[in-house]
Image (tube, rainbow, N blue to C red):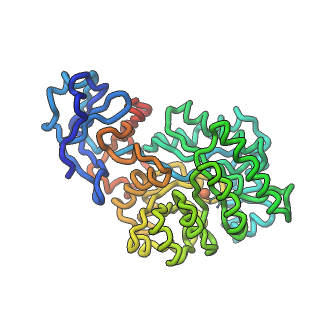
Amino acid sequence: KPAANHAPGAANGRWDGLILGASLATLDCADGYGEVGNAALGWLDGLITYVGPRDGLPGAPEALAREVITTDGWITPGLVDCHTHLVFAGDRAREFELRLQGASYEEIARAGGGILSTVEAVRACDEDELLRQSLPRARALLADGATTLEIKSGYGLDFEGEHRMLRVARRIGEELGIGVRTTYLAAHALPAEYREQADAYIEEVVQWLPRLHAEGLVDAVDAFCEGIGFTPTQTRRVFEAARALDLPVKLHADQLSDLSGAALVAEFGGLSADHLEHTSEESVRAMAAAGVVAVLLPGAFHVLRETRLPPLASFREHGVAMAIATDCNPGTSPLLSLRQAIQLACTHFRLTPQEGLRGATVNAARALGLGDRGALRVGMRADFVRWKIHHPAELGYWLGGDLAGGVWIGGQRVHH
Ligand code: NIG
Ligand code: FE
């Protein structure tokens, strides 16, 4: 159990807020929930100033903080959704219907549907319209406890479209006060106008990157390395362009086949390899050695009715940190709750609810290279959620429902 700790000197000024009475799952520990019963959590200027038992507070609550809230339930760090494609237009419900009648995701993609049909819809939208369609998805994720979202481009596939998507991602952050990390995913699919010219398209992708980065629109770089995506050689070309700008990389790796994508991320010292259903033991070793986080996407696994599990035992054995994300996208994972993703990871991948919660907090923050969030610790961002539950295992248990009874980002309450 973490000892009571508070920022030196914080008791001199007054904290902005102090919550009393709830239990905490701090996750500020190597494993376990980091439970603190009958706890207190204080914050000032957006950062946590106190985490610990209520009776360890350095003074009377009313003297310590301007606002004192007494409550019950559990408080966890704000959830971090480290892999989403939530900026898009339209939907692919009709494609879902076709898949249920027997067509495979790959067949639909090869026939020009799939990702390319969303590209058409996105190209037809201006920035405001794209924002209008995307905001409700970000709001839904926030309402179920997500305080940081990673958002990818990848449905524009031309300079203007990618630019528009990344700008919309930034605007979502401003509009909702939520943390947003943007990822450049122009190497998501081959646009129709480059048919049979994948290498030429990749050269374009490499040219656009510094221009977008110069506008502050890119925090990381990703690609879809797959038979229906790009080859390892093309992916390497994109990663080299990222490295030239000191941008971290991540990858849609080994989802439908093993192209050693995860090992490629390791070679580049990347943040995460994502999906990983077909990742080999050798690649897992490379991930462990390079500290690459395994991002599990149980929503896509579920919706595509996959049967091949990621090498979970191997991740545990080699000490690869596992994160969980929604992969919120119109094709393979129309999933609007990270808590629901934890449930799917527990059900399909047999993660423990504890692994699930770590996967959507500490490990997800690591997958984004963020050291200032993902746990409740003095000095970290005051991003936290109060849950109407009796035990944190419930976060990996309920399907649906309304469990978030308050979401704070940087000490500001942003949801009831
Ligand atoms: O993470 N695999 C590629 N990208 C997405 C799917 C995108 C789409 O189908 O629109 C994924 O599953
Ligand atoms: Fe994805």
Residue at point 64% right, 73% down?
A: 259
- Near-viewer residue (325 or 73): 325
Tell me: 329 left or right of 299. Answer: right
Residue 50 seen from this side: yes
Q: Where ligand 2 lies, by image quadrant?
A: bottom right
* Residue 187 placement: quadrant: bottom right
* Picture coordinates of residue 269, whole percent (x, y): 53, 61
Residue at 48% x, 54% y is 367
Q: Percent from the top left, x then y, of residue 282? A: 51, 77
* Residue 103 seen in the current view: no
Quarter where residue 212 is shown: top right
Furthest residue in direction bottom, as rendered: 281
Where 158 sits versus 228, above or below?
above
Horizontal side, residue 329 vs residue 339: left or right? right
Residue at left 21%, top 27%?
11
Estimate the x, y position of residue 100 in percent, counting from the top left: 66, 66
On screen, residue 317 above or below 325: below
The residue positioned 44% from the left and 62% from the top of the image is 322
Q: Is 50 located above or below residue 11 in the figure?
A: below
Tally of numbered tags:
0
Q: Position of residue 309 (x, y in %)?
A: 51, 73
**Quadrant in the picture for the C terminus:** top left
